[in-house]
Image (cartoon, rainbow, N blue to C red):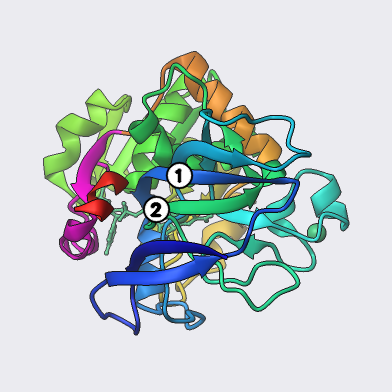
Amino acid sequence: MITSIGYAATQARAPLLPFNFERRDPGEYDVVLEALFCGVCHSDLHAVNNDWGSTRYPLVPGHEIVGKVVEVGSAVTRFKIGDHAGIGCLVDSCRECAPCHEGDEHFCECGATGTYGGFERGTRIPTYGGYSNNYVVAERFALTIPQSLDLAAAAPLLCAGITTYSPLRHWRVGPGQRVGIVGLGGLGHMGLKIAKALGAVVVLFSTSESKREDGLRLGADEVVISSDPAQMKAQGNRFDFILDTVSAEHDINAYLRLLKRDSTMCLVGLPEKPTPFNARSVVLGRKSLAGSFIGGLRETQEMLDFCAEHGIVSDIEMIDIQQINEAYARLEKADVKYRFVIDLASLKS
Ligand code: NAP
Ligand code: ZN
Ligand code: ZN
């Protein structure tokens, strides 16, 4: 086993503290990463707080990991020692079911293995996430980080990037379309950049007047303050697609009203409480309400290459691991510009 160190929560809402643990030994198909940077996703905070009722403690969060390959198994072909590599939200799956065969490992019928909070496949060894100094992963679940991307700013692409890229591609967002992005946080700001790069006219919906300038800078053609009924009314029946990234309870019916006939709103945010939904919101106009969950390995690599081609990375606030609890408090108040990334060199200090 490999001796490792990270930061863990030991119970719901407890502050994260230093934590020693062991990872499995690498096999012939595995790479060992020295973790350099890890993004802080709102899902980490939901998991720490047990918002979804399924958290196992101790929990080492972190599923936006970039690092340096320090060891490769004898059968590894895509990585060599010294390469940069990334790990996103999943680290294994059954590899045999239809979704696994079709590149949708995240929808594995046997349940994909989460980067944290799960068990190494076929064992009772817990998976611990990227708020740590290393990771052992099968090379088929590791991503190549294009060299042109800043490494720390590329980390959030591994969750926030793919979670917004995947639905934007699935619903074929492109030129000539008017697309709404709801919420300007980690996912929202990536959604803005990617939808813009895909050629759509992009409208940001934010609760925060203070984010208007940033919204325009990040690629929005218009910014709508969602708490202002007059601004919302003016957007009625105008959207081809809306992507909702909001992490807390809010009125989704207000956005369904903004869709054109036959158009779709996709939820990616995962608030703690169920969302009230009025059938009239979709019946009138034959509209669709959908959801989307991260993305498979093939599409995640495609997204990284797309981001390299379009010069897209995340806007980050770098923190030391010792500041993680403070960062969570700010995330809870929608106060991040626009993704915290942990410099894991701070684990040694
Ligand atoms: P984040 O950085 O905290 O951003 C969430 C944004 O939602 C905030 O910046 C804020 O934007 C808006 N918001 C927050 N509270 C609100 C409220 N009460 N009413 C209206 N708007 C509010 O979070 P994130 O990391 O982007 O994650 C967003 C959500 O997606 C989380 O629930 C997370 O668990 C989920 N997620 C899902 C997937 C998936 O695969 N489906 C993957 C990753 C994350 P404004 O200030 O602009 O209003
Ligand atoms: Zn995430
Ligand atoms: Zn499977």
Rendered image quadrant of residue 276 = bottom left
Residue at 62% x, 51% y is 137
Residue at 75% x, 47% y is 28
Q: Mark 1 highlights which residue?
A: 34
Query: Could you say whether the residue bearing mark 2 is in a helix, strand or loop?
Result: loop
Query: Could you say whether the residue bearing mark 1 is in a helix, strand or loop?
Result: strand
87 or 233: nearer the viewer: 87
36 or 253: nearer the viewer: 36
Q: Which residues are magenta?
A: 315-343
Residue 204 visible, this orientation: yes
Q: Is residue 60 left or right of residue 209?
A: right
Rendered image quadrant of residue 224 = top left
Residue 44, position in %: x, y? 39, 63
Position of the N terminus by quadrant: bottom right
Q: Mark 2 highlights which residue?
A: 133
Residue 41, position in %: x, y? 37, 54
Residue at 44% x, 61% y is 253
266 or 120: nearer the viewer: 120
Q: Earlier in the sequence, mark 2 or mark 1?
A: 1
Q: Amino acid at mark 1?
A: Glu
Marks 2 & 1, CB-CB < 8 Å contact = yes
Q: Amino acid at mark 2?
A: Asn
